[in-house]
C-alpha cells in the first residue's frame, strides 16, 4: 500500500462525508487539485472510482476497527 501519505493532517470529527454527512475517515486528494471527504461506508463504495481520479487517498478507516471485537459485535 503506497496510497496513504502521512503528510496531510489527520481527519477530525469536524470532517464530514460529502455524501451523507457522517464523520469522514477518508480524504481523497484529486488529480485536479480538489479534495473529497468520505465516511468509511462511502469510501468503500466509491473506492474503485476514486482510485481513478485520486492523486492521494488518506485512509483512516483503521481507526474504526480499532475497537474491541466484543463491542463491535454488539453493534450488529
Ligand atoms: Zn457517507
Image (cartoon, rainbow, N blue to C red):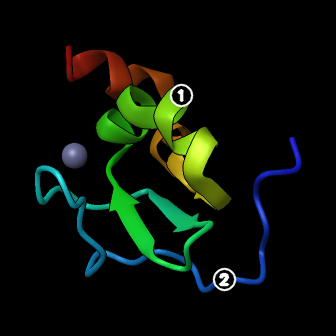
* Residue that protrudes farthest toward the left in the picture: 20
42, 29: nearer the viewer = 29
User: What residue is at 46 percent from the left and 77 percent from the top?
Assistant: 34
At 51% across and 43% down in the image, what residue appears?
A: 50
- Furthest residue toward front: 32
The label on residue 65 is none
Label 1 secondary element? helix
Is residue 62 among the parts visible in the rendering?
no
Residue visible at 52% across and 61% down? 28
**Label 1 vs 2, first from the N-terminus:** 2
Left or right, 8 with reference to 2:
left
Residue 40 vertical placement versus 76 (above, below): below
Describe residue 52's horizontal placement relative to residue 20 as left or right.
right
- Ligand 1 within 8 Å of the CB at mark 2: no
Q: Which residue is mark 2?
A: 8
* Residue 32 position in % (x across, y down): 55, 72
**Near-viewer residue (39 or 45):** 45
**Alpha carbon of mark 1 to alpha carbon of mark 2: how far?**
22 Å
Residue 47, x across and y down, in percent: 50, 34
Residue 67 is situated, as x and y percent measured from the top left of the image, at 47, 40
Mark 1: is the Cβ under 8 angstroms from ligand 1?
no
Q: Quadrant of the C terminus?
A: top left
Can you tell which quarter of the image residue 72 is in?
top left
- The answer to the question of whether label 1 and label 2 lie on touching residues, with beta carbons closer than 8 A, is no
| Screen quadrant of the N terminus | top right
Looking at the rendered structure, the secondary structure element under dot 2 is loop
Which residue in the protein does label 1 denote? 48
> Does residue 21 appear in this view?
yes
Amino acid at each position: 500500500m503506497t496510497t496513504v501519505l502521512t503528510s496531510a493532517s489527520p481527519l477530525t470529527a469536524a470532517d464530514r462525508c460529502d455524501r451523507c454527512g457522517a464523520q469522514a475517515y477518508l480524504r481523497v486528494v484529486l488529480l485536479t487539485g480538489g479534495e473529497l471527504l468520505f465516511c468509511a461506508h462511502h469510501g468503500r463504495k466509491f473506492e474503485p472510482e476514486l482510485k481513478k481520479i485520486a492523486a492521494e487517498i488518506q485512509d483512516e478507516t483503521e481507526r474504526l476497527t480499532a475497537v474491541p471485537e466484543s463491542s463491535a459485535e454488539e453493534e450488529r
